[in-house]
Image (cartoon, rainbow, N blue to C red):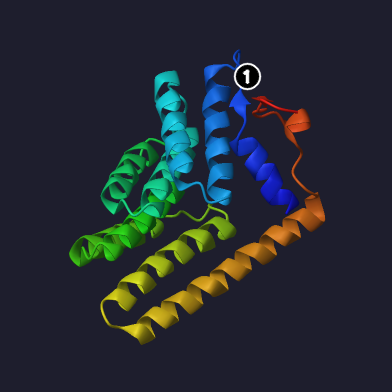
Amino acid sequence: AARRAANQAFADSQPAPTLPLLELAEFYYQRGTSASAIGRAQQFLDDSKKADEIAVASNVPPQRRLRYIQNVALAYMGIGDLKNGMEAQRQRLQVASRTDPSIGPMVSTYQSLANAQVRMGQIEAARESVAAAEKIAATAGPRMQKALKDNMNGLVLRARGALALETGRPEEAESAFRAALALSLIVIVAGGGVIATKGLPLGIEFAGGTSIIAQFDQP
């Protein structure tokens, strides 16, 4: 109840009038996320699009814009607009190719694109997306952290599973989903080990980052 109240309060908030553009983009991104958490699908879409529009106008780094486009894609798909959702994923793919490193974001985008294509019945296109994700994931070098590799391989396996399920291969789908789950558990355990040995990441007061300033109509 407390979390829902907090999300509703933030979803109803307005940005401070003097907020710099980069922080304004982050504000709309966060407000849209809060709106999504309480079931406001249209606000999620509107705020996500606003965040991305500001990000483009502000020429934000590609790595940061990826989050905004991902929310736009998710918001479109949430209201059943798979066509625009897929277009947003294609835009995300273009931005991902300009990030450094680009492997992880591109695998993630191809996996999301494949899932959308499966839902739309575009099986051949989905196969191409899965193959592209597999090919990119295979280029991960020995210096990449194992947890990142496991996460990428898990994304590929989930895409394979969705495709196999849609094309009448339930046993192959189950095998892929089970393998993806196993990799996810490995990543979670590894993350828990990092927290146990190094502690929780520092907040923005110590490590830097973006602070969101919201203005509420009522106290």
Taking the view exactly as shown, the residue that stands out farthest to the bottom is 171
Q: Percent position (x, y) of residue 62?
A: 43, 33
Q: Nearer the viewer, residue 41 or 134?
A: 41
The residue to which callout 1 is attached is 16
Would you place residue 121 above or below residue 14 in this image? below
Task: Name the residue type under label 1.
Answer: Ala
Q: Which quarter of the rendered picture does the C terminus lie within?
A: top right
Q: Nearer the viewer, residue 136 or 179?
A: 179
Taking the view exactly as shown, the residue that stands out farthest to the front is 218
Q: Percent position (x, y) of residue 92?
A: 36, 42
Q: Secondary structure at mark 1?
A: loop
Q: Residue at x 43, y 43 (%)?
A: 42
In-image side of 136 versus 187 (left or right): left
Q: Percent position (x, y) of residue 181?
A: 54, 73
Q: Name which quarter of the figure residue 93 lies in.
A: top left
In-image side of 103 versus 210 (left or right): left
> Residue 153: in sight, yes or no?
yes
Q: Which quarter of the rendered picture does the N terminus lie within?
A: bottom right
